[in-house]
Image: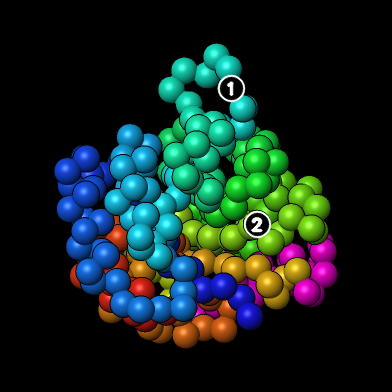
């Protein structure tokens, strides 16, 4: 059975005291669940979050990392640095990293390789822009992002890979792909993986939906057979909302 995951991407929000407060609330509000629950504070708060959640089932994950192990890369963070504070999962390729920082598929392929080499788990994000959807190119764009950023990976490494489909037009806009649209794309992603690898690989990989999931729509989105959870943005910053989404899985 595929793993169910609800991951909260906090982006550039919450200072040290605010992070501690939100984590305290989450520890008391997150319901018992067989799903994996993850939170991703900013780099400067990761170490303290790991300590605070040491006796919790909530995993702390990073929002990004560099492909090099060390070197003259001012402001960057390596896999070894993350692992040294207890981080074993990293989000890569978020649409905001692609849009604002110019991260392309070639760069992300190097980051994926670096994470897997360090035996970290990768949550790889991808998805189409509004013009791609309107132009009917959404399947082509998603297929290209997968092939260029990920399909060089050996089949044996797919146990360390989680996918997060993000329709970019539904992030931070209040718009949400319909549950049917989410299911259609998630099914296409599995078909694409099966064609590149095999059906077994396609069926074991967890595919998250990342586009304005809220307590009001989580149940319906998560009910779709190929949707295995969510990468949650704004709602992850509100303890009651994030707990309700976890309950929905």
Image disc number at residue 160: 2
Image disc number at residue 191: none
Q: Earlier in the sequence, mark 2 or mark 1?
A: 1
Front position in the image: 28 or 54? 54
Q: Position of residue 233 (x, y in %)?
A: 34, 57
Q: Secondary structure at mark 1?
A: loop
- Eyeballing the image, is 72 above or below 39? above
Query: Splitting the image into 4 quarters, where does residue 234 fall?
Result: bottom left
Magenta range is 179-200
Is any atom of residue 30 visible in this view?
yes
Front position in the image: 78 or 153? 78
On whether residue 177 falls in the magenta region, the answer is: no
Q: Position of residue 118 (x, y in %)?
A: 65, 41
- Eyeballing the image, is 195 above or below 83? below
In 3D space, how far apart are the residues under numbered discs 2 and 1 (Cα atoms)? 23 Å
- Identified at 36% across, 40% down, the residue is 47
Q: Secondary structure at mark 2?
A: helix
Q: Which residue is mark 1?
A: 70
Instruction: Indicate left or right for 231 with 186 as reference.
Output: left
Instruction: Indicate left or right for 57 with 126 as reference.
Output: left
């Amino acid at each position: 059975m595929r793993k169910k995951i609800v991951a909260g991407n906090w982006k550039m929000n919450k200072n040290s005291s605010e992070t501690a407060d939100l984590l305290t609330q989450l520890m008391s509000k997150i319901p018992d669940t067989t799903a994996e629950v993850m939170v991703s504070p900013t780099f400067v708060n990761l170490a303290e979050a790991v300590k605070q959640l040491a006796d919790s089932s909530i995993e702390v994950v990073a929002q990004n990392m560099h492909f090099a192990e060390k070197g003259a890369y001012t402001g960057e963070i390596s896999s070894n640095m993350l692992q040294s504070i207890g981080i074993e999962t990293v989000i890569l390729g978020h649409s905001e990293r692609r849009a604002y920082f110019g991260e392309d598929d070639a760069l992300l392929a190097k980051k994926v390789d670096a994470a897997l080499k360090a035996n970290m788990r990768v949550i790889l994000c991808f998805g189409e822009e509004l013009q791609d959807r309107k132009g009917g190119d959404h399947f082509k764009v998603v297929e290209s992002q997968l092939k260029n950023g990920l399909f060089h990976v050996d089949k044996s490494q797919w146990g360390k890979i989680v996918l997060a489909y993000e329709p970019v037009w539904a992030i931070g806009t209040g718009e949400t792909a319909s549950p049917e649209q989410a299911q259609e794309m998630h099914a296409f992603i599995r078909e694409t993986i099966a064609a590149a690898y095999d059906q077994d690989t396609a069926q074991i990989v967890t595919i998250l939906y990342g586009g304005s999931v809220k307590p009001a729509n989580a149940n319906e989105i998560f009910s779709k057979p190929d949707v295995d959870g969510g990468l949650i943005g704004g709602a992850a910053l509100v303890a009651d909302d994030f707990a309700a989404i976890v309950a929905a899985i």
